Amino acid sequence: MVIRLRQAHRNESAGAAEAATSVQTLAVLLQAGAVPLTAWRHLAGTGDPHAVAVVGRVDEGVPLLSAIEAERGAWTDLAAAWEIATTVGAPLAEVLRIIAESLRDAASAADDVRIALAEPAGTARLLLWMPLAGLLLGFALGFDTLGVIVGNPLGAGCVVVGLLLVLAARQWTKGLLRQAKPGPGTPGMRAELVAVALAGGASIDRALALVDDSSASGGSDERIRAVLDLSRAAGVPAVELLRASAAQDRHAARVGGRLRAAKLSTRLLIPLGVCTLPAFLLLGVAPMLLSVLSSTPLPL
């Protein structure tokens, strides 16, 4: 369970990093004069699996934007940026460079969180095996643990309750790890897309509508509107404020992830004390004690 969660974190951050590299390559190809579909074919020719999949869908008649969005994950944000840039007439190569930088920064933040979570997650994995290790220890030391479990109702009850506590500890720990996991989407991406639309000449209302119609995730609409209000009040270009806000969102995601990982180490002690340690006593100590008592002759 813990391994699956760690693998999911790793796959998400690796996917964003791979997407950033591919998007950067596309930006270079477009800036060199390649048309969009040709740029994708060149990228597919390098063996990029996502580009190969996108080109394959396009060859089957799927529109390019839909083919990109079908890759999901960070590619959904790329599809949204691509659509907005082409709609407002923003320079596509420059937009892709900005998106690549955002994805790379988000992947770096996710890696920081994954590294911070590695130690408490590994500790949780070790402790979850402790009750079962106690049960095996009884067999290894030569106690008649199996006879106690099968022939003694009290021993069978201890094993059943111990296993239930192990399952409860697993679910409890899984929930704590899920709460510490970074949220979906690329932090600050919606602010970046509003900035792209505004840089392309769209009005604020149209820029917000384009982003709302897109499938991009990551960022607070309330925060975007607060930045736009600040831009109006201070007479500062909204594009730069929005990009600064997006960078701040990514920084906040990195710091928040580290703080959640630090708190996780303490919170994991709760299922340890409530479930794991009692399960160890019930599965490891109680059967051995009952075995000793059943093998000791009663005094006359």
Image (spheres, rainbow, N blue to C red):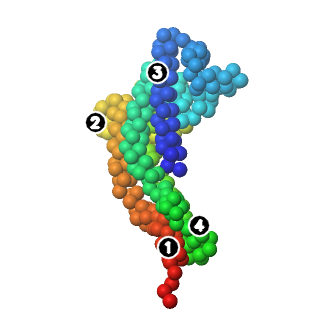
Q: Name the residue carrying label 1.
A: 292
**43 and 159: which is toward the camera:** 159
263, above or below 141, in the image: above
Query: Does label 1 or label 2 sit earlier along the sequence?
Result: 2
Task: Look at the numbered discs 1 and 3 and tell me whether their residues touch, using CB distance below 8 Å.
Answer: no
Query: Does label 3 or label 2 sit earlier along the sequence?
Result: 3
Task: Look at the numbered discs 3 and 2 and tell me whether their residues touch, using CB distance below 8 Å.
Answer: no
Q: Residues within 10 Å of mark 1 (few under 14, many from 20)?
A: some
Q: Name the residue carrying label 2.
A: 234
Q: Name the residue carrying label 4.
A: 146
How far is mark 1 from mark 2, CA to CA?
80 Å
**246 and 53: which is toward the camera:** 53
Q: Which mark is residue 24?
A: 3
Would residue 229 be seen by someone viewing this image from the given angle? no
How far is mark 2 from mark 4, CA to CA?
77 Å
Dot 1: what SS? Answer: helix
287, above or below 237, in the image: below
Residue 18 image point, x, y percent: 49, 27
Looking at numbered disc 1 in the image, what kind of residue is underneath it? Val
Q: Which of the 4 image quarters holds residue 272?
A: bottom left
Residue at 53% x, 77% y is 294
Residue 76 image point, x, y percent: 54, 33
Looking at numbered disc 4 in the image, what kind of residue is underneath it? Leu
How far is mark 3 from mark 4, CA to CA?
62 Å
Q: Residues within 10 Å of mark 4 (few under 14, many from 20)?
A: some
